[in-house]
Amino acid sequence: MKLLARVRRRLVPLLRRHRMALLTAPAVAALLLLFWSAAYGDAQLPYKDPSLPVEARVKDLLGRMTLAEKIGQMTQIERKVASPQVLKDNFIGSLLSGGGSVPRPQATAAEWVSMISDFQKACLSTRLGIPMIYGIDAVHGHNNVYGATIFPHNVALGATRDPDLVKRIGAATALEVRATGIQYAFAPCIAVCRDPRWGRCYESYSEDHKIVQAMTELIPGLQGDVPQNFTSGMPYVAGQNKVAACAKHFVGDGGTHDGINENNTIIDKQGLMSIHMPAYLDSLRKGVSTVMISYSSWNGIKMHANHNLITNFLKGRLNFKGFTISDWEGIDRITSPAGANYSYSVQAGILAGIDMIMVPNNYQSFISILTGHVNSGVIPMSRIDDAVTRILRVKFTMGLFENPMPDATLADQLGKKEHRDLAREAVRKSLVLLKNGKPGAPLLPLPKKAAKILVAGTHADNLGYQCGGWTIEWQGDTGRITVGTTILDAVKAAVDPSTTVVFAENPDADFVRNGGFSYAIVAVGEHPYTETQGDSMNLTIPDPGPSTIQTVCGAVRCATVLISGRPVVIQPFLAATDALVAAWLPGTEGQGVTDVLFGDYGFTGKLPRTWFKSVDQLPMNVGDAHYDPLFPFGFGLTTKGNAY
């Protein structure tokens, strides 16, 4: 009855207007079309038909889009400048949360889902109903979100030499990201860090491209395993419990001069292809959906403007069919100073082959300038169509049109016990034992039963320091910034109930000497940092770290746990400490540290990076002619676990 009523409403006025022409062929066709439209509405538009091939759906939808709708798809904006009206008015295709950008501090999964649902409803209410894709830096777990499991940073995972572990971390991260309604993670970072002075070195699995290649297993963890006979370069996401991944930062970000962030990678083509490019080939074989372009330059050419590498090589030679995305204000930084000629930046970035622009704030200017460039012929419509085709391909492939809304039933995945247990496993496998007493007299493993033990150091009871940058805030933070277990918490949980644990962050020598301690655990290291703020020319750990080691270890047998994103200067206090553990940036699960300190599990981690003697040696990587390390790449003492 409803169907007939709809037909009657449309047919009667037409009959009145066209009495004399009813028998002509065009009129009959029009009547049939009207009947079909009334009967089936928009549900049977080809792009809305999940039974059709993805490429057919993309082509159909692209053919229906206006220039404004196409440019909207290419525009990614920060949630802080977004509103339902902004999304509708500009046909926005993507949103993101930058570091620390949250609905409110300590927001729950339900609050994230509510925010994203409101944004998505606005996008679905537009003429064509194209869903948006929401991206976030989930680079060591879902690290912006309070209560999420924070896994060790990539440098630590490189020390495990365990790609399957990394894949399982990817799968857990995908579930936690989906628990908040988000469908896109800006991970993995597949930089090959060649100089630890770089502030992003902890985001790199290793100085050795082979280890970085192996750890691209994070991609099938995040996205799912590609099917048999999969075509390398096509995007792939297995379903609603998986997220689109992003290989970054293309290409050479880890090779900049003196490790300066966003700087110039000076290397010949053979070096670029043999060191920095291989992990991208692995990523494409595993179906990575997106590739983020690097702020850095290659031999003086900004990567965000490098048509040869983005279009000719990545899209052409390597057959990448997903979409490329700029970094945050990445096109702005094509000019020096950044933003000096935004019109040129838009032109250069889009013509280089970047498909989606992480604007992220000044979207009105971006949309206006790009529209003008297309209308004036500076940027051809074919380039716009290529970009939008790629973005739509990813959205259709991942099922976003069929399942655009968040799944509120996944909320219990956030910070769940199984994920924390996995993070704890990752911590214990990542620890590298650099020193263990004297020959024949090892200090580790430590006895759980002792009269009294001292725990000292700035990093012993500081969850923020333990997690490092990219945690809750962009730059990380100090203190109890999220849910987790500090090293001090873990020590108290591990020791025998009869053992007294005393904590003193920076005790004086008399306190240590006269305290009657059986032994001490000292945890010190770097303060959190991210990107340029982490660039360091001296690589020393801040005070009072070194003096705490000297004071405590000068008075009692001690094990030092070093919390850092990279090798740092340790020679001044190496002799003072009886045992030294490189714990990297372990994340929220501090019990992974004590699992190994107390011998429940053995030390198995191997250095993913060369440990230098002096910064004057840098850059120095395994295989270099002047290779003279304090601890070589691959070094790591072992112990046997006794409880399992």
Image (spheres, rainbow, N blue to C red):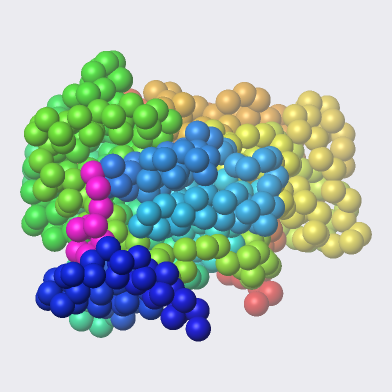
Residue at the (62%, 24%) spot, across then down: 543
Q: Look at 12% across and 76% down and name the residue there.
A: 25
Q: Is residue 552 left or right of residue 410?
A: right
Residue 382 position in % (x across, y down): 11, 48
Q: Residue 132 in the image: x percent, y percent?
A: 42, 53
| Highlighted range, magenta | 58-67
Identify the image quadrant of residue 254. Answer: top left
Residue 589 appears anywhere in the view: no
Is 312 positioned to the left or the right of 472 in the image?
left
Q: Residue at x 36, y 70 (%)?
A: 12
Which of 391/468 is in front?
391
> At which x and y percent is residue 394?
31, 61
435 or 322: nearer the eye?
322
**Front residue of 6 and 52:** 6
How many tags in the picture?
Answer: 0
* Residue 530: percent from left, percent from top: 48, 34
Q: Main secondary structure of the magenta part?
A: helix
